[in-house]
Each structure stands twice: as structure tokens, then as C-alpha cells.
Amino acid sequence: MKKINFSDSRFSKMVAGKGFYITLFCSLLAIGVAAFIAYNRSLDRLSNEGQNLNMQVTTSSQNEWGFPDDDDADAVDHKQHDVPKDTTTTTTTATTTTSKKEPISTKPANKPVKNTQPMVMPINGEVINPFSDGELVKSKTLGSWKTHDGIDIAAKVGDNVKSMTDGTVKAIKEDPLWGVCIIIDHGDGLEAHYCNLSPGVTVKVDQDVKAGQVIGSVGETAEIEVKEDPHLHFGVRKDGKWVDPVKLINPL
């Protein structure tokens, strides 16, 4: 019987070729299995590290809110429900501490005190020239048109002039046009001008006066209204703007 020489036959070549692919397949399979095992081990390690990290964060959070190290689940759960309360307390404390560092001014605000005292007309008499409210009216003395920023109250020379309400004398002056004038600050943004007075006034600068108190008397010193009948020229400013004294004192 003839022996087959596998080293020279086609069969030997075929087996040798398939052996290479089998070896390659086995090698790849071994590499895949090794990679799969390494992947699973990595997942297990990451999972364990994540659990440890969560435990550390939980412990850190508890310590931050002042939680004691307590293994009692009920105690921990009870304190966790108190977190919002502790949070509010912590925030309030921080705010209070900050405000203590800031200087607090106890100086009262510089606001004018509202005058609650009654108001009276400075003299009893007829209003012969009303407040023009910015409109031009003809002056008997000047013969020209101008605004009349106050009212003229008819009176006799020497009649007493009263303060319309409580206030402080701001100025006493002799104006070249309006004659002897007393200016009183009545508070709440009110400033009254009592003009065409006699030289002998009964008050002085910085003096406090009461409502109805006599401050002077009617005169004939206002050159700008010298052709008018004897009267008191009475003007009032509210926050720096001329207003109608009649509507201010008798709004109805």
C-alpha cells in the first residue's frame, strides 16, 4: 500500500492554510474574551467608586447642616426634614451679621415738618386784586401789564397784620418795589410774603410765631402799588411756586 506524503500533497497544503485561519480565529477570540472580562471589571470598579462617592457626599452634606453622625435611620430622616428650617436660620444669621458690619445712620431725614395748625387770613378785608395765576393784569401804578403773584387785601393804614399759621421769621427787608416785607417759613414747603407794611414790625428774624400772632401793621411803602387803595399785599409760595392764598386758606 502506498504511503501518502502529507508534506507534498495538496491536502497538506490545504490543512496548513486552514490551520493559519483557525489559529488567527482562536487568537481573536481569546483577545475578545480578555477584553470583555476587563470591561466587566472596569464597570464593577466604577460602580463601587460611585457608591463610595455618594456616601461621601451624603456624609459631607449632613455635616454641613450640622447633622450628627448617627446610624439611626429614623433620626437621620427626621433631621433631613428639618433642612429647610436650618437653611433659613443660616441665611438669616448671615444677613444679620452683614448688616451689623454696615454703619446705620440714626440721623433723621431732612424733611419739612407738615404744619397741622389752623390757617387764618392775615387781615380781615376785601380782596381788591386777586391772584392772577400767571395771567397778565394791568397795573394802575405802572400803567402796564404784569402778573399779580399775590392778593391785595383792603385795609386801613395801621391795621394789624397776623401770621397766617405757625412758622419762623425767615427775613425782614425793605424792598424798593414792595416796601417793608416780612417773609415767614410756615413749614411743609410754605413761605408767605407780607408786604406793604409799616416800618415798625413786631417780630425779628429767626423768631417763632403762632397762627394769628400780630407781626406788623399795614403801611404805604410799596412803590409798585402806590396808586392802589391802602392794602396788604400777601403772597404765598408752595414748594417755590406762587399759589393762590385764598384757595390755600379757604379751599372751599
Image (cartoon, rainbow, N blue to C red):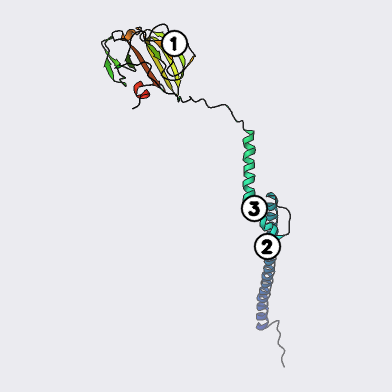
Location of residue 122 with respect to 25 vertically, above or below: above
* Mark 2 and mark 3: Cα distance apart in space: 31 Å
**Viewer-side label of 1, 3:** 1
Residue type, mark 2 in image:
Ser
> Residue at left 72%, top 59%?
72
Instruction: Specify the label residue 244 is tagged with.
Output: none
Rendering quarter of residue 79: bottom right
Name the residue furthest bottom: 1
Among the two numbered marks 2 and 3 on one chain, the one whose residue lies closer to the N terminus: 2
Q: Relative to 17, is 166 on the left or the right?
A: left
Q: Quick one: SS at disc 3?
A: loop
Instruction: Specify the label residue 47 is tagged with.
Output: 2
Could you say where residue 87 lies in the image, as x and y percent from the top left?
A: 63, 48
Among the two numbered marks 1 and 3 on one chain, the one whose residue lies closer to the N terminus: 3
| Label 1 crowd (10 A; few <14 / some 14-19 / many >=20) | some
Along the line of sight, the residue nearer the viewer: 174 or 129? 129
Q: Relative to 212, is 33 on the left or the right?
A: right
**Viewer-side label of 2, 1:** 1
**What residue did someone put label 1 on?**
172
Residue type, mark 1 in image:
Ile
Q: Label 3 near label 2: C-beta < 8 Å? A: no
Rendering quarter of residue 108: top right
* Mark 1 and mark 3: Cα distance apart in space: 71 Å
Does residue 49 appear in the picture of this structure?
A: no
Along the line of sight, the residue nearer the viewer: 221 or 49? 221
Location of residue 43 with respect to 80 vertically, above or below: below
Q: Label 3 near label 1: C-beta < 8 Å? A: no
**What residue did someone put label 3 on?**
82
Along the line of sight, the residue nearer the viewer: 91 or 198? 198
Q: Quick one: SS at disc 1?
A: strand
> Residue at left 28%, top 18%?
136
**Viewer-side label of 2, 3:** 3
